[in-house]
Structure formats: C-alpha cells, structure tokens
Amino acid sequence: MVAVEFAKSPAETLKVDSGFTLASVDPESTPGYTGNKVDGKALLGAQDDRLAELQEQLFAEGKFGSDKRLLLILQAMDTAGKGGIVSHVVGAMDPQGVHLTAFKAPTDEEKAHDFLWRIEKQVPAAGMVGVFDRSQYEDVLIHRVHAWADAKELERRYAAINDFEARLTEQGTTIVKVMLNISKDEQKERLIARLDDPSKHWKYSRGDLTERAHWDDYMKAYEAAFAETSTDTAPWHVVPANKKWYARIAVQELLLEALRGMSLDWPKAEFDVAAERALVAES
Amino acid sequence: MVAVEFAKSPAETLKVDSGFTLASVDPESTPGYTGNKVDGKALLGAQDDRLAELQEQLFAEGKFGSDKRLLLILQAMDTAGKGGIVSHVVGAMDPQGVHLTAFKAPTDEEKAHDFLWRIEKQVPAAGMVGVFDRSQYEDVLIHRVHAWADAKELERRYAAINDFEARLTEQGTTIVKVMLNISKDEQKERLIARLDDPSKHWKYSRGDLTERAHWDDYMKAYEAAFAETSTDTAPWHVVPANKKWYARIAVQELLLEALRGMSLDWPKAEFDVAAERALVAES
C-alpha cells in the first residue's frame, strides 16, 4: 500500500504570516491533507524510517564537524497533544540523537536568572535534535495572561527571544516552532476523558482548569507572540490538533522538510578505507 | 500469532555469580530462548507496548511521590550493539521518561573530580528510566587495561562503585547491569561490515582497532569487575550478543522483569473525581 501523502506542504499551509488570527483556522481541519485517519496513521508509520535516517545523518555529520542541528519547539494548551508528538513522532528517532527538555515552572535558581538562562542550557549540540516541550514562550504566554510581566517587559522578552533565535540560526540551528491548536470544546472532552479513565488520572491537574478559565486571554497571548516572533528564519506553525493523527503527521512532515532543507549526507571517511580494512582483517 | 517467549528468565540464566568466567559462555548462544531470529523479532515487537506501559506507570508514580527509578547500565566492546539496544529496546519507551547518557572520554573538568562525579549528575530522577551507554565501569576497564590506575586505585574504585550503587538502590533505584558479549571474530566481521558500507563509515574509529588489540586484557578486566561488583542488589548480566536479535530480547526481558518487580500501578487520584468532572463539564 502506498501511503497518502500531503498534497500541500504544512510548511506553507500552516505557517503564521503577519495578520494571522487563530479565529481564521479550524482546529478540526486537516490543511493540505486529503486522506482520512487510516491514511494518516499509515503515513506516520511509513515516514518513520525516513525521519530516523535523516536524523542519523544529522548526528553523523555532527561527529564530523558540522554545526547543523534541529530544534523543535512545542507550545500548546493542556491536553493538546504535546506528549503524543513526543512519543509518536520524536519517538521514531534514535534516542541517542535527541535531547528532550520538558520545561516546568522555573526553580528558584532559574528565577534568579534571566528567563533565557535555563533555555540556553538545553539548546541542541551539533548533530542533535533538540525538543522543547514548552519553552521560552511560557514567559510571554502564561506571564502575559496572569500579568506577571508588564507590557514593557513583554516587549523586552519578544525582542530577546528574536535575538536568541537569530543567534541559534546563525550557529547552524534550524528552528521549527509549533503551536498545537485545539478548540476549547475539544479540551473539555479530553479533560473529561482523563477523568473517566483511572489510568489517566495522574495526567490530570486541578491547575488545568484554572488556566482553562483564561482561554481567550491565552489565545490573545498566542496571537501577540506570533505577531512578534514569527520571523523569516524561525516562523511559527499553527497545527490544527483536534485530530491527533493529523497533528502528528503535520509535525512529522515539518521535521522532514526541515531536515531535507539541511542537505544532509553520510560523512566521507577521513581515513583510507582499504588500508583500514586490511588492518582489521589481519587483527 | 503468539510470540515465542523465554523458557527460562534471562535474569537467572544470564546472571553473573561468583567464579564466573567469560570463557564459559558462548557469544553465539541464546540461553533460555528456543525460538529463532523470526520468533525473536516478533517477541521484541510484541513486548514493546508492555514495556512502554510499565515505564509510563513508573513515570506516573514518580509524579505522585514515588522514589522508584530504573537504571540500565550498558557496557561492551565496540560494535557489540549498545546503540542497537538503545534504539530498538529503549526506543520503545516514551522519550519523556528516559534519561540517556553516553559517557565519552572525560572532559578536563570531569577529570578534575572523582570518577563518580560526572556519573552522579546523570542518575535517573524519581519515575525515570536512566540509561548509561558506558558508565563508571570505564574507570575499572579501560583504566585497568592501559594501567592508568594501579591495583590499589582499582580496589578503591570497585569499593566506591559498590557503595555508590548500594546508595542508589536504597534510594529506590533498580539497577540492571548488562555486558553485551560478542566474540573477537564477530567484532572483526562487524568492523569490516562498517568499512564496506559508506553509510557506516562515520561509526568507524581508528581507536577501535587499538582497543581490539587488547582484547584479552579487556576480558580479564571485565571478569575482575564482575567478581568485585556483581552484588546481590546490583548483579551483572552477561548477554550473548553475536546474535543481535537475541541480545535485544534478552535486555528487553531484563527490563520487563525489573519493572515487574517494582509493583507498579496507576497512581490513585488525590482529588474528588466526580467533583472535578462536574467542574470541567460546567467550564
């Protein structure tokens, strides 16, 4: 069976341009993809090996002096499926080449530093795929919603983030920024589903409901962040996420496109292959 | 199809007891397993979900105050398949719950500290699965082979390792120590295979041949390490690894048994489920 592929690239259809509003996109939609859930799941499985191969080439090049690296930034409302992206998309890559960081509420030590201090420590090394489950954007999202930062400080942070990401890009990092976009109704269904399944109770936090009450403020905070930080070198992508299977293939495709854009190849041997072969054979 | 399971547990058949010698085990053998390669690959796939579920329970318990954690220590001669264990066995678990560390030659900062300093920083947190690709044992293996440490210092290190592992165990860590055991001939074949495949050249290091020349000394160093550090709480397992498929199911089974031994379960909700459900429904 040949898997149904994307008709139009998510890198184009899901990219956030100026004037973007969340109201203009339907979290139930599947932009650029004509297949159904069965097709989508088949595509996810079919592309796993290709993703793993490109990631291995990135890793291999990193061992031979390349400064290329990939950074996936995941932001979303609770239950939107960040964890599923990590296990079902990122999980197909070799754990050796992936550096995953789940940013929680900052520690006292982290709070005593600039908000980018803890982020800088987790950026991917050469050859690595970094994955941020939440990120520096928490400092312009939840901080804006709860007014923990005023307008002037938020402006400083947007600019600092842009400078930071520009520096990463100049160092060889390709940045893929993804907001998983679920609807408020879908979140309600998922929270109830968690409460109805005892094996999911541990995932439920009473704090989720507190943040849910600020839904509209969050959407405004996301739109402000997109307007300030969706740059040419590190654009945002808003991925409709009510359908988990679509969100997964869309993020997988964004990663594949990012890796394809890096012109990866297997490093050439820096030794005389025939001579080494003879030495091994004699050993 | 029902997968062929282990007839005898690798936790028993592969465990290193006193008086163990590497000469007494055949790297081609498949102890406790009567199936063939096809059966083994089917078993590996069939057990993936169970391994992932147990790991998720471990992770979930960690969020609810449990101090349980799992540490897999992998040691082996080059090409023995540590990387394959990481990608094919560990890779089935959720990346969020796995903390992998590949220990390389120590940095200057690391060398300025006791050998356990860099190890301590990477032990798994509560609820996590830690994986060490190489470990504190390098300091009693390569250091012994090249006489970078004298007999007295080696004795100090064995004792320090035992104390360190006993402390981890008392803190709730289950330690699974694995030596992947390939034959010298099998290593030669694998090195030549790497040289014959341009997509594998990046994995070949001329240093591999240097260490290969000390094969017998390495085997003695492993036996000494087993004799000194295969304890009741943290025994070594020597896994025949000429057949990659066998090594993978054996390590998978060791992990499954370790996790089963932790009496894991889904944490009980610390909130009133019905009350929360009503709040969510109203929100």
Image (spheres, coloured by chain):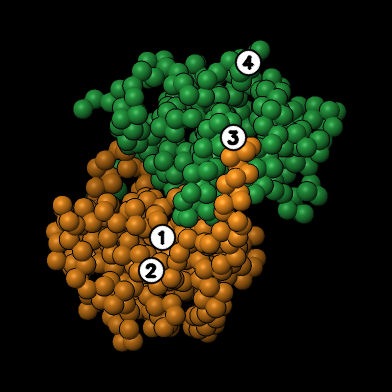
Chain colours: A green, B orange
SS at mark 4? loop
Q: Which amino acid does label 3 sit on?
A: Ala
Disc 2 crowd rating (10 Å Cα; few below 14, some 14-19, many 20+) is few
Q: Mark 3 lies on which chain?
A: A
Q: Name the residue under label 4.
A: A20
Disc 1 crowd rating (10 Å Cα; few below 14, some 14-19, many 20+) is many
**Real-space Cα separation, disc 1 to disc 2, in angstroms:** 8 Å
**Real-space Cα separation, disc 4 to disc 2, in angstroms:** 50 Å
**Real-space Cα separation, disc 1 to disc 4, in angstroms:** 43 Å
Q: Which amino acid does label 4 sit on?
A: Phe
Tag of residue B260: 2
Tag of residue B54: 1
Q: What residue type is labelled 1?
A: Leu
| Tag 1 and tag 2, C-beta contact below 8 Å | yes
**Real-space Cα separation, disc 3 to disc 2, in angstroms:** 34 Å
Are the numbered discs 4 and 2 placed on the same chain, yes or no? no
Q: What residue type is labelled 2?
A: Arg
Are the numbered discs 1 and 4 placed on the same chain, yes or no? no
- Give above or below for A189 relative to B231: above
Which label's residue is closer to the chain start, 3 or 4?
A: 4
| Tag 1 and tag 4, C-beta contact below 8 Å | no
Q: Please report the residue visible at 34 percent of the width from the left and 24 percent of the height from the top.
A: A36
Could you say where residue B85 lies in the image, as x and y percent from the top left?
Answer: 35, 56
Tag of residue A76: 3
Q: Please report the residue visible at 42 percent of the width from the left and 82 percent of the height from the top.
A: B231
SS at mark 3? strand
